[in-house]
Image (tube, grey):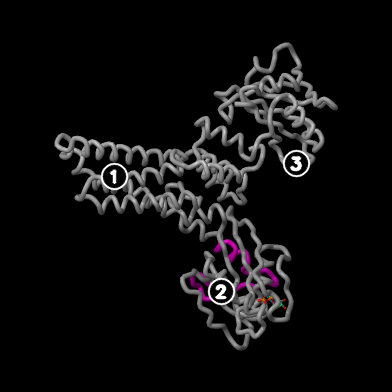
Amino acid sequence: MRAIAAISTPVGAGGIGILRVSGEDAPAVADAIFICKGERPLKDTPLVMRFGTFDAGDFRDCGYAVYFPSRKAYTGEDTVEFYLHGGVRIMRGALDAALRAGARLAERGEFTRRAYLSGRLSLADAEGVADMINAESAAALRAAYRLMDGTLSRDIDALSLALGDIITGLEAVLDYPEETEDEVLPPLAGQIDGVLARVTALLATADEGRMAKHGVTAVLAGKPNAGKSSLMNALLGEDRAIVTCKPGTTRDTLEGSLECDGVRINLVDTAGIRESSDEIESEGVRRALRAAEHADVVLHVVDTTDPTGSDDLCFEGTRVFTVRNKCDLTSYKCPRMYGCFAVSAKDGTGVDALRRAIAALYTEGRTASGEVITSERHKNALYRAKRALESAKQSLGGTVDLTLVDLREAYDALGEITGRTATEDVVDGIFSKFCVGK
Ligand code: GDP
């Protein structure tokens, strides 16, 4: 394939900038723009960092080049990487020189797409690469790494193989019922159950995977003036929310995030929840209740000094932590109960314990296997596979054709995860989310 070129490091001044060229004619492009020091041409020294001069035409830079032969390259095709001084103008000039020498500008994610097309990566592995780059916490990185290193793909391939065997057996039953029925049909229910159990187990990790990738979402809710905005700032460790002593300041939801114990925490500060005649504020209250519905935990903030006592807010179906704030002003003793906290947003008392309890919600539900579903796309495909397998089970004892239809549907759904049966649109959608140069 024709060589593609792109700057793989972010645009901006940096110690080093990397230009990457990949494709059959990458070594020829390199020869036109890089003069290696020493006798041997770059192509004769694979995987060796060679010092030399980069000739961009209107300027020169000194740096290094490495030639990766196709079998050792990320893309699965001949690749040359140049390590130059990371200046904006240097890198732009270096890229232009590579384009003049015959390469074309790479599209978003095209290096990884070529790795996928050459069979070096599955579609799920490629998504793991994107997740690594976009990860915002250690937990997200760990999950992305497991995806990128092929753990999920191997599991899905094993399930597809098992399902493929079942399908082949049943097809034989269709063609030669008398010779094969007695062998194929008796173990069928057990075999489908085996695949179904694994698919169900994978789906059960989706919540953990979501928290690993996107973080734990905690919504602060409670009466106006309970100290929600102050607590949000204290949890974030910075002045992110506007704090005033006039009730009803936080009219919309306000978001911020932090990392605690390797877990990303997304905080959503909401409008104080109370009856209000102010239309904008009422909308804020509605949004608060809606945000609470989608939270992993609601931090129900209560002012311990409030003479009117606690409110009677009810967040059905969501985990709630009761957070008694302003404990610096009272001698309030917090009951030793799970989900009860006494804090002072003002002097910081109890704030770290609360932060860690929120982060622990991720660790709490973790499975031992370490393999988690972090992508909605994978979750969706697994759901469809599960439904089809359940339907296949129900159809047992009836006509073999019907069971086969369901099993093939499950097989195709699983194949979408690794790319075996993914449509061009799905593949395009995935790679369009990458940056240029990856
Ligand atoms: P919100 O309406 O629930 O967001 O409440 P704010 O965060 O705006 O706080 C309302 C008032 O309570 C402000 O005057 C804050 O300074 C004060 N406040 C908030 N938290 C504390 C606390 O822990 N201790 C004390 N003494 N005052 C607090």
Q: Which residue is mark 2?
A: 289
Q: Which residue is mark 3?
A: 11
Q: Which residue is mark 1?
A: 404
Q: Amino acid at mark 2?
A: Leu
- Relative to 187, say whether 117 is above or below: above
- Which of discs 1 and 2 lies nearer the camera? The answer is 1
The C terminus lies in quadrant: top right
- Relative to 428, say whether 261 is above or below: below
Callout 1 touching callout 3 (CB < 8 Å): no
Secondary-structure class at tag 2: helix
Question: Which range is magenta?
Answer: 334-358
Q: Nearer the viewer, residue 77 or 259?
A: 77
**Residue 219 location in percent, x, y?**
58, 68
Q: Nearer the viewer, residue 142 or 429?
A: 429
Question: Distance of mark 1 from mark 2, alpha carbons?
Answer: 46 Å
Q: In the visual, does 246 lie left or right of 197?
A: right
- Can I make out residue 327 in this image? no
The N terminus lies in quadrant: top right
Secondary-structure class at tag 1: helix
**Residue 341 location in percent, x, y?**
56, 72
Queried whether the magenta region covers residue 407, the answer comes back as: no
Question: Distance of mark 1 from mark 3, alpha carbons?
Answer: 53 Å
Earlier residue among tags 1 and 3: 3
Secondary-structure class at tag 3: loop
- Can I make out residue 348 in this image? yes
Q: Report whether the residue tagged 2 is closer than 8 Å to ligand 1.
A: no
